[in-house]
């Protein structure tokens, strides 16, 4: 990312924190395309399991971000990290509502090949959320790396930069988190 792309977002976030009421209106058009692209990438992995359009996910996540106060994002990278968490929360909330209505064990989605050895076998979003929450208790940075990659589709270079670690450290963390989540998600299943 170049400084030219980062600076307007960072300046608008600073203006929002300073109380500028128009800063949020100017921010949304700047970040909308990238938020929509991230939502589209995430929803493409669901194989029709969730009936939510990328535009809807972006709007719901943005409303979650601006539910009264400005998000506490310091710069562009942090803003997209916060947006990734909001998208995760929107998807998990929707899955919980469906689960409550259907009582069938929850919404089934498929994640990227980064986490699922076989992309054709869907994972339960609620189970993934619970596993990520447990992983965060053990190692918050590893859980955050998975969240940024899976829910925001952010590339590894940006994740390393956001988390303030080297690319090599991120690679080790990510592999460890994948293995931890695989074991956590398959704990009740017999070995093949």
Image (tube, rainbow, N blue to C red):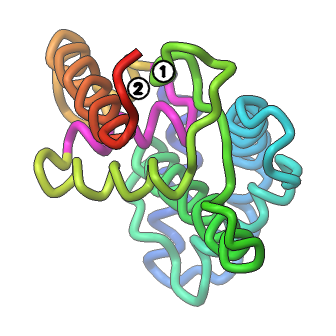
Q: CA distance from mark 1 to mark 2?
A: 6 Å
Quarter in which the C terminus is drawn: top left
The count of marks equals 2
| Residue 81 as seen in the image, left or right of residue 95 | left
Magenta-highlighted stretch: main secondary structure?
helix
On residue 116, the disc is: none
Q: Position of residue 108 (x, y in %)?
A: 67, 46
Query: Is residue 151 rendered magenta in the image?
Result: yes
Q: Which residue is mark 2?
A: 158
Rendered position, 3 above or below 89:
above
Q: Residue at x 58, y 62 (%)?
A: 92
Apparent side of residue 85 relative to residue 32 in the rendered image (left or right):
left
Q: Residue at x 45, y 65 (%)?
A: 14
Q: Are marks 1 and 2 in contact (CB under 8 Å)?
A: yes
Of residues 147 and 35, the one nearer the viewer is 147
Query: Magenta stretch: residue 50 in it?
Result: no
Residue 126, percent from left and from top: 52, 58
Instruction: State which region is magenta.
Output: 141-155
Q: Secondary structure at mark 1?
A: loop
Give the residue pinned by disc 1. Answer: 155
What is the residue that sits farthest to the top in this orientation? 168
Q: Position of residue 123 (x, y in %)?
A: 57, 39
The residue located at (44%, 39%) in the rendering is 148
To which quarter of the image does residue 122 belong? top right
Badge 2 crowding class, 10 Å Cα cut-off, few under 14, some 14 to 19, many 20 or more, is some
- Image vertical order of residue 113 relative to residue 88, above or below: above
Q: Is 120 situated left or right of 85 in this image?
A: right
Between 146 and 164, the one nearer to me in the picture? 146
Q: Secondary structure at mark 2?
A: helix
């Amino acid at each position: 990312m170049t400084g030219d792309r980062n600076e307007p977002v960072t300046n608008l976030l600073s203006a929002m924190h300073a109380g500028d009421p128009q800063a949020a209106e100017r921010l949304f058009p700047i970040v909308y395309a990238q938020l929509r692209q991230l939502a589209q990438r995430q929803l493409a992995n669901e194989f029709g399991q969730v009936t939510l359009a990328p535009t809807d996910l972006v709007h719901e996540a943005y409303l979650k971000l601006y539910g009264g106060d400005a998000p506490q994002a310091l710069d562009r990278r942090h803003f997209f990290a916060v947006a990734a968490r909001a998208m995760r929360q929107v998807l998990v909330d929707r899955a919980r509502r469906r689960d409550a209505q259907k009582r069938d064990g929850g919404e089934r989605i498929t994640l990227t090949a980064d986490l699922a050895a076989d992309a054709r076998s869907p994972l339960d979003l609620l189970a993934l959320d619970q596993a990520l929450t447990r992983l965060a208790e053990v190692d918050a940075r590893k859980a955050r790396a998975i969240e940024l990659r899976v829910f925001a589709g952010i590339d590894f270079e940006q994740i390393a930069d956001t988390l303030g670690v080297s690319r090599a450290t991120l690679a080790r963390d990510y592999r460890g988190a994948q293995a931890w989540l695989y074991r956590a998600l398959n704990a009740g299943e017999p070995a093949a």
